[in-house]
Image (tube, rainbow, N blue to C red):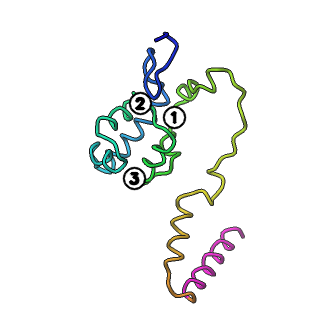
Amino acid sequence: MNAGKRRRNSVSVNGPNPVDVHVGGRVRLRRTFLSMSQEKLGDAIGLTFQQVQKYERGANRIGSSRLFDLSRVLDVPVSFFFDDMPPEIEGRAPRKSTGLAEAPIESFEADPLTKRETLDLVRAYYRVGDPAVRRRLFDLAKSLGNAATT
């Protein structure tokens, strides 16, 4: 294998990508916070505990669909895995290190409709069976929102 080439979903000859190590560390942080074993997490997403170990060390990259599965099982938004990333690690991301132009990225965080809290609130609202109670709840929320802006 050439020195600069990477194997698919694995570490390069220079070691794991720091971004992958950070994401894996965030998986481990959340898993341990929930007192969940690697085996239990692996079972929940269809992997062995050894594969979970490799993800947590950054030895294997986590694909987008697997990251989505992890966010569901660990009950966090996908962005959680990238939170608190030090600037020096961000600078090692492939887009940055290859000199590609910085594309403006609109923040999903600015859109309240993309927040988990909003989805939970909407789900709870529709679980209220009585339409009259649901309407009063809606009016209350609107009233509170209007009061906060005045």
Q: Is residue 70 left or right of residue 85?
A: left
**Residue 95: image x %, image y %?**
63, 27
The verdict on residue 143 being magenta is yes
Which comes sooner in the sequence, label 3 or label 1?
3
| Badge 3 amino acid | Val
Sequence order check, earlier mark of 1 and 2:
2
- Distance from label 3 to label 1 (Cα)? 22 Å
Q: Secondary structure at mark 2?
A: loop
Magenta residues, dominant SS class: helix
Amino acid type, mark 2: Asn
According to the picture, the residue beneath numbered tag 3 turns out to be: 73
Nearest to the eye among marks 3 and 1: give it: 3
Whole-percent x and y of residue 123? 52, 70
Secondary structure beneath disc 3?
helix
In the depicted view, which residue is nearer to us: 9 or 95? 9
Contact? badges 3 and 1 (CB < 8 Å): no
Q: Residue at x 32, y 44 (%)?
A: 42
Q: Is residue 35 magenta?
A: no
Q: Residue at x 54, y 87 (%)?
A: 133
| Dot label at residue 140 | none
Q: Position of residue 53 (x, y in %)?
A: 32, 34
Q: Nearer the viewer, residue 142 or 132?
A: 132
Quarter of the picture holding the C terminus? bottom right
Please give the residue where the numbered disc 2 appears in the rendered image.
Answer: 60
Left or right for 119, reference 105: left
- Label 3 vs label 2: CA separation? 19 Å
Tell me the kind of residue under disc 1: Met
Disc assigned to residue 85: 1
